Amino acid sequence: MAFDKILIANRGEIAVRIIRACQEMDIKTVAVFSDADKDAFHVKYADTAVNIGPALSRKSYLNIDNIIKAAKENQVAAVHPGYGFLSENERFARACADNHLVFIGPSADCISKAGNKSAARKTLIDLGVPVIPGSEDIISSPQQAFEIAETVGYPVILKASGGGGGRGMRIAHGREELSEAIAVASGEARAAFGNPDLYLEKYIEKPRHIEIQILADQFGNVVHLGERECSIQMRYQKLIEESPSPFVDDDLREKLGEIAILVARSIGYTNAGTMEFLVDKHKNYYFMEINARVQVEHPVTELVTGIDIVQQQIVIAAGGRLDFKQDDIRLNGWSIECRINAADPQDNFMPSPGKIEDLVLPGGPRQDRRSGPSRRSGSQNGHPYIQ
């Protein structure tokens, strides 16, 4: 089976990335957009674009009915959710299946195990995989959170059960802080993912954040593509991602890769996914969570392995086999991704969005940095590189 047209249920950079992958595979694309994004680049870059609602995400990019309607009216074969929004939403994956649309990602049943962080944690405990001490399920009440925190010891961290990306995460160093953190984190998780559920873990201070990229087809073939290190963060948002990690040696890479594949097989995982670990200074590791989607930092893995992860997602969803084995994976060179954020240094680096009035891209020595090619906002090798 091959797809002739795909709808991208997302916006911005990831939508452009998926459109580019589809173009290289001769697949038509349908973009969706809210009223606020009618002039966005992904809208212009796709073959077709459909308005799915007002600016508020819950009325547009989180509106399952509107997205399914757009997909059916445009006769697409599959839907790619990107990252964020509905990418780890079991109900959305089921809605796609119910409407004869292929969801480019893990199955709805798998999302219920992997995408839900607390459910995944229970599975890992049963497998004997090292996990961070904490709740075995979602927190049902503040009192339960207090009791678990007293057992594992402060500081503790709250995490959103139904999402990632640093949303719905709060650290608490005592009972009073924990009470406040529950309300704030739950509200943030509800707004970001439509799911207010939280779970609690012991907070490990100054850890390394190491994640393993996997690919799994529908025929039982699972491989890992090495690690990414994402330890440099601000407010739980990753700022610097690199592959391979300067901290991970061959032995640790092999161990983490084996665990990642074990976990994927245990829950019948298919498509692309990321297994996240916290590693302390002694290289003790703890399985943290499964990200049942493509991630923002996937390009650093693509650059060192030569494997296009987004195209592999599409191939797998269409019923194709992985055409490489674990022994074929080689990490060549080193890559880094830096997330550049508009922030106000005079206001504790709070977000400071606005219009970019001037941009100078690196162009090498002795180049006219004001008027040379580095200021172009067009395309390079046929692909747009500035939005």
Image: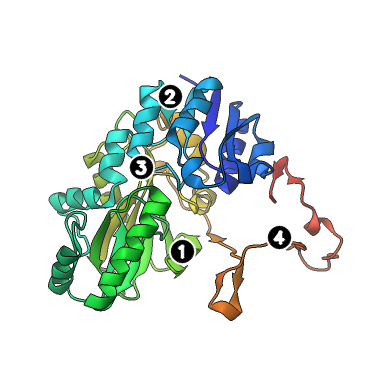
Query: Which residue does the image show at 42% across and 66% down from the upper left?
Result: 236
Question: In the image, which disc is placed on residue 355?
Answer: 4
Q: Earlier in the sequence, mark 2 or mark 4?
A: 2
Q: Position of residue 195 (x, y in %)?
A: 33, 49
Instruction: Identify the residue under disc 1.
Output: 237
User: Taking the image as drawn, is residue 276 in sight?
Assistant: yes
Nearer the observer: mark 1 or 3; the answer is: 1
**Which numbered dot is residue 101?**
2
- Residue at the (32%, 59%) spot, across then down: 186
Closer to the eye: label 2 or 4: 4
**How much space separates mark 1 and mark 3, taking CA atoms?**
27 Å
- Amino acid at pointer 2: Leu
Closer to the N terminus: mark 2 or mark 3?
A: 2
Q: Nearer the viewer, mark 2 or mark 3?
A: 2
Image quadrant of residue 206?
bottom left
Classify mark 2: helix, strand or loop.
loop
Q: What is the spatial separation of the Cα atoms under label 2 and label 3, in whole angstroms? A: 26 Å
- Picture quadrant of residue 374: bottom right
Q: Earlier in the sequence, mark 2 or mark 1?
A: 2
Name the amino acid, label 3. Val
Q: Residues within 10 Å of mark 3 (few under 14, many from 20)?
A: many
The residues tagged by marks 2 and 1 sit, at their Cα atoms, a distance apart of 32 Å
**Upstream in the sequence, badge 3 or badge 4?**
3
**How far apart are the alpha carbons under marks 1 and 4?**
22 Å
Type of the residue with mark 4: Lys
Of the residues under marks 1 and 4, which one precedes in the sequence?
1
Residue 48 placed where, x, y %? Answer: 64, 29
Give the SS element for disc 4.
Answer: loop
Residue 223: numbered disc? 3
Q: Answer yes or no: do the residues labelled 2 and 4 have beta carbons within 8 Å? A: no
